[in-house]
Image (tube, grey):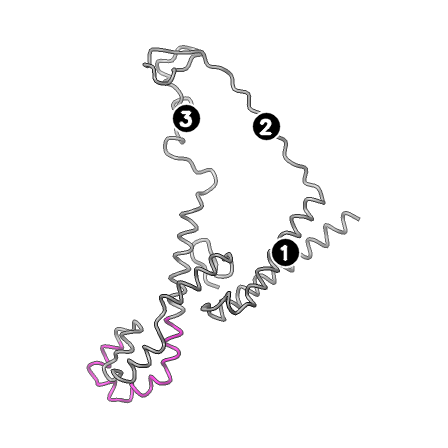
Amino acid sequence: MQRLSNITVYDMSEKELLILRQEVEQRKKNPAAAWLLWFFLGLFGAHRFYLGRIGSGIAMLFTGGGFVIWWFVDIFLMSGMLRDNEHKVQAEVIQEIAAMRERDAKPRGYQSREAQQPLKDRLYNTSARPEGLIRREGISNQTWVKREPIDVEILPEPPNTLASQLLEVEAKEHALRNDLLILKDPKRVEGISPELIKEREIELQKQLLDVILKKEEIIRKSQ
């Protein structure tokens, strides 16, 4: 499991998985291009430069592909280098998705600097306010009007009945089953490594099992 900021690779929504797949497809190196570079310019380490392996690329450049031996060995190493490049790109995209989550979702209780000031200081100047009065907006600080009381209606919270709990659990179960179906659709997960797909599938199955057990417990209580 890779954990980046507050997001895990199997804690991503359907939209985030789609973004991950599209970005990985756009950013990862082209296998055909890598093999062509290996075949025509491999003795100079061109394929390793292309895959971001600068150090070994320089070594091949000055040794003629490791005296041709290194160039030949890369036939068996190329698939692993391409896979490593894809995993690196996936990690970068996941970091960007995590940053996007943090940017789009303000923490609960977030307040601007102005809102963090005491309410009385933001509404009126306490140093010059006569008792029981507030400053009228748009008029000088010396003009005051009487403060009118504000009635705030507090709505009662809905009762946490077994029926509402059952509806909530069934909704979670439906969402988890839907996510599992998405993972089994090759078109929806194209471009995502099998390891990440397997990790997310295992996590979803654990969550689904917990939800089913909770659902059965609620049903027993309601009988």
Q: Nearer the viewer, mark 2 or mark 3?
A: 2
* Residues under numbered marks 2 and 3 in contact, where contact means CB atoms less than 8 Å apart: no
* Upstream in sequence: badge 1 or badge 3: 3
Residue 145 drawn at (x, y percent): 42, 11
Q: Looking at the rendered structure, which numbered label has been put on residue 174?
A: 1
Report the residue marked by disc 2: 154
- On the image, the x and y values in percent for residue 47 come to 29, 78
Question: Which quadrant of the view contains residue 67?
Answer: bottom left
Q: Secondary structure at mark 1?
A: helix
Residue at 32% across, 77% down: 33
Q: In this picture, which residue range is highlighted in magenta?
A: 56-85
Question: With 117 as the anchor, is 202 left or right in this view?
Answer: right
Residue holding disc 3: 118
What is the three-letter code of the residue carrying label 2? Ile
Q: Earlier in the sequence, mark 1 or mark 2?
A: 2
Residue visible at 36% across and 11% down in the picture: 143
Instruction: Name which residue lies at 38% across and 72% down.
Output: 84
Q: State the separation of the CA atoms marked 1 and 3.
A: 45 Å
Tell me, yes or no, whether the highlighted magenta stretch contains residue 63.
Answer: yes
Query: Is 101 placed left or right of 166 in the picture?
Result: left
- Mark 3 crowd level (few <14, some 14–19, many ≥20, 10 Å Cα): few
Residue 40 bears which disc, if any?
none
Up the image or down, 6 lies above or below 146; here it is: below
Amino acid under label 3? Pro
Secondary structure at numbered mark 2:
loop
The kind of residue tagged 1 is His
